[in-house]
Image (cartoon, rainbow, N blue to C red):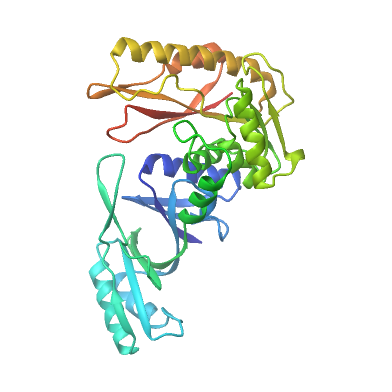
Amino acid sequence: MKYLFILGRNVELSKAEVFSYFEREENKILNYQIDKNGLLLDLERPIQEIVNFFGGVLYIGKVILEGEKNEIQKKLDKTVLYSGTSNKLNYAVWNFSENYEFVLNYLKKRFKYERLKTTFKNMTGKINLQEGEDFDIPSSKLLDEEFFVFDYKNKILFGRIVEDYDYKNVEKRDMEKPIRRESLAISPRISKILINLSKVKNGETLLDPFCGIGALLSEALLQEIKVIGIDKNKNTISGAQENFKWFGFAKENYELLNEDSTEVKISSAMGIVTEPDFGDVLKKIPQKSEALKTLKKFEDLMIKVIKNFKSDISGRIVFTSPYIRIGKKRVKCDIEKILNETGYQLLNEIPEFRENQVVGRMIYVLEK
């Protein structure tokens, strides 16, 4: 089965997340192709209602038909494109094809022949990619249908968007939880991405050694992953407990410890997923010496924590680290130092930042 994943602003990170998710689910990717922010996957098994498990996926589309240019019109003629009860149709078409105009003209003629009162919505909305490019998205939310066209192995693929990310609900529950730390808490989007990169499955246990008020752990618990959260700050542990109570999470699925993660002992866990303390919040670009001092402190902390839990963790370690702007460049932690000291191997290193952000993230995925 072929599906289109329309990725978010950090295409490299979103792609890594999607690939890790399907590895975890043991749903083999038979083939793939990427065009701009469109990732076409040929999957071993069909999927349904999964978009909200991701942090870096905006929409999922399903391929309805495929063929060469001289075949596609006949196949479209035999396909029901709109089955709504109203004769009014607002639609948009995502463009990942050199044959976009050909398919769009067909749709306009087809809907006119079917006597539908249609309004075609151009992709006038914009999202800025981390790499600096823009990509187009629908500006209107009042769409009855979203189609897409994608060129794949000398064929035209045509399909429709079947799932879109529920921003409103995710934002609502994040804003309404009783304890929040706006400047420090990790977002649901990044939390989901890190969890998927870890490949920890539902029913398994995830450890966050710097859990704060439990923002990341909440996303794991919503996926039926068991969690252990540790934090030195007693108030943040109390905040996590209050948030978990508000969510209604079963107590047997989580353990919260007010301890030091460089020393505390735990029962086993499948993986570590965490955003450690990045140090003082920097609002101005620091001197290089100050940035390097912050990074060294971070490296030493992570080495102690990884060593402390190494015998208890059987799977991956996924963590973020400061990616600090100095002038026109950025500096990152010495990952080789962390690897050499802990005996782990580097699987992935992906930057996540916005252009004017002083401290961005470098995301690391490690394995024994």
Q: Is residue 72 left or right of residue 165?
A: left
Q: For the image shown, how many numbered marks are present on the structure?
A: 0
Compared with 219, 311 (above or below) is: above
Q: Quadrant of residue 199?
A: top right
Compared with 310, 6 (above or below) is: below
Q: Nearer the viewer, residue 308 or 341?
A: 308
Residue for point 27% across, 33% down? 356
Q: Nearer the viewer, residue 298 or 5?
A: 298
Q: Is residue 8 left or right of residue 256?
A: left
* Residue extending farthest right: 252
Compared with 99, 311 (above or below) is: above
**Split into 4 quadrants, where in the image is the C terminus?**
top right
Q: Position of residue 87 (x, y in %)?
A: 38, 86
Compared with 146, 229 (above or below) is: above
Q: Quadrant of residue 124?
A: bottom left
Q: Position of residue 245 (x, y in %)?
A: 68, 42
Q: Nearer the viewer, residue 340 or 332?
A: 332
Q: Is residue 208 visible?
A: no
Residue for point 45% across, 40% down? 16
Q: Position of residue 334 (x, y in %)?
A: 42, 16
Q: Position of residue 11 (x, y in %)?
A: 37, 44
Q: Quadrant of residue 357?
A: top left
Q: Is residue 343 left or right of residue 3?
A: right
Q: Is residue 183 left or right of residue 212?
A: left
Q: Is residue 159 visible?
A: yes
